[in-house]
Image: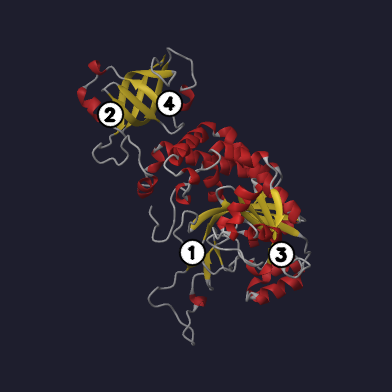
Amino acid sequence: MAKRAKIKELLKSTAFGTEVTIKGWVRTFRNSQFIAINDGSTISNIQVVVDFNNTDDALLKRITTGAALSVTGELVESLGKGQTVEIKAKQVEILGDCDAEKFPLQPKKHSLEFLREIAHLRFRTNTFNAVFKVRHALAFAVHKFFNDRGFVYMHTPIITGSDAEGAGEMFRVSTLELGNPPRTDDGAINFKEDFFGKETNLTVSGQLEAELAAMAFGEVYTFGPTFRAENSNTTRHLAEFWMIEPEVAFNDLVDNMDLAEDLLKYVIKYAMENCAEELEFLKTRLLEEEKQKPQTERSELDLLAKLNFCLDNEFERVTYTEAIEILKNSKANQKKQFKYLIEDWGADLQSEHERYLVEKHFKKPVILTDYPKDIKAFYMRQNEDGKTVRAMDILFPGIGEIVGGSQREERLELLEKRMQEMHIPAEEMYWYLDTRRFGSAPHAGFGLGFERLVLFVTGMTNIRDVIPFPRTPKNAEF
């Protein structure tokens, strides 16, 4: 069997006159002569020219959109526009037929909504080839960033007995019989008879376990799936998504902000350098999509300009209190253009407020710090004012919050008091509190939602289009 050449490499080759073999899928077949083939190595196709006068008619009829072929032929300089090379076919073999009448991906423009319904086939389109190549590059860059800085990659549990966020929106994991579970004397479900001997759920975060490791290794990070049973059908929410969560001993809030800014700039730069073809395609796609919108709703920056906007600007660091004053006095608030009006300190900021700060006021990425403790999780370090905690959120254009983090509360008595106030049972969290009992130290970390990052870098507008198989309410296909 001849060694397969990748189309990506052949398109850059000048070795004209050499015999090559390619294998891929038919995108189009014109005039019984010109086959556009793609093998997934690039979003670009290579043209194969068939001598239809000397090719069996039965074979030609089997060359349909979606069919898998093996082609051996001579690499020649192309005379056609938009391509430098093509293959003059000597041998064409059908590896897999594709019924043109039934194949959903015909050579025409398909809506993203339609492609979501056939997510098992959408990888074969240029858009999703580009999106998932960028996703791969970003994931690799995350690991490279932390590895090069000496961090230890921790695999935290998928099944857990704790609710890290205190949100309660968790998927239960159980082997008990659904219709007739064992009961205690008072009629409650007896989880002692369950597989793990207690109530367990799918994790919402690896943070608490990462903190345990940070107290031994100093610098750790997690990168794995997390789950929220939130009945939210929006373009920004998934029930299953991936989180990047570094945790660093001896870091304070400023160190934490520096690390997060460095990470974001590093991975965006890596994607721009290694996915130039894909990002150029996605930029053009987005510009075409924007033409359908009214002028007032169009983005001020194209995709590449938006990415450079984040690389070229130092992130603005602002306290929550300062942000509330800016929002309260803004024209958008005074003219009641915000859906959620800002009236008092203590309000939980919505996406429209976050985007206003980034896109209209500061015109650069923003890091908000020192939030009211009442709207933040129990583990965040309390400030001396008794009202705020050392939290931070990073806000990006077009997307709002992309990172959430904090300096952690390392003082045992204050952490126990906060858990009591928030009705978090200390006896079940003894293992977490032990890190404060035995050699406690200041430490900090953050969570970066990976799909939000991919959404930002690709310019896609629905989070379901940046994860291969989206899990959403009433949807768990494949």
Q: CA distance from mark 3 to mark 1?
A: 26 Å
The residue that mark 3 highlights is 389
Whether residue 448 is visible, yes or no, is no
> How busy is the neighbourhood of tag 1: few (under 14 within 10 Å), some, or many (20 plus)?
some
Query: Could you tell me residue 115's position as x and y percent?
Result: 37, 45
Q: Which label sits in the foreground, 2 or 4?
A: 2
The residue labelled by disc 2 is 63
The residue at 20%/23% (across/down) is 57
Q: How far apart are the two marked residues, 1 and 2, measured between alpha carbons? A: 46 Å
SS label for mark 2: loop
Cα distance in 3D space between marks 2 and 4? 19 Å
Camera-nearest residue between 325 and 138? 325
Q: Residues within 10 Å of mark 4 (few under 14, many from 20)?
A: some
> Which disc is residue 4 wearing?
4
Q: Earlier in the sequence, mark 1 or mark 4?
A: 4
Residue at the farthest top position: 17
SS at mark 4 in the image: loop
The quarter of the picture where residue 47 lies is: top left
Instruction: Looking at the picture, tell me which residue is in the foreground, 108 or 136.
Output: 108
Residue 100: percent from left, percent from top: 25, 36
Mark with earlier residue (1, 2): 2
Q: Residues within 10 Å of mark 3 (few under 14, many from 20)?
A: many
Residue 159: percent from left, percent from top:
54, 63
Q: How many neighbours does mark 2 have within 10 angstroms: few (below 14), some (14-19), or many (20 or more)?
A: many
The location of residue 299, given as percent across then percent down, is 52, 43
Which amino acid, by three-letter code, is at mark 4? Answer: Arg
Nearer-N-terminus badge (2/4): 4
Distance from the alpha carbon under mark 4 to that under mark 3: 58 Å
Closer to the camera: disc 1 or disc 2? 1
Q: CA distance from mark 1 to mark 4?
A: 46 Å
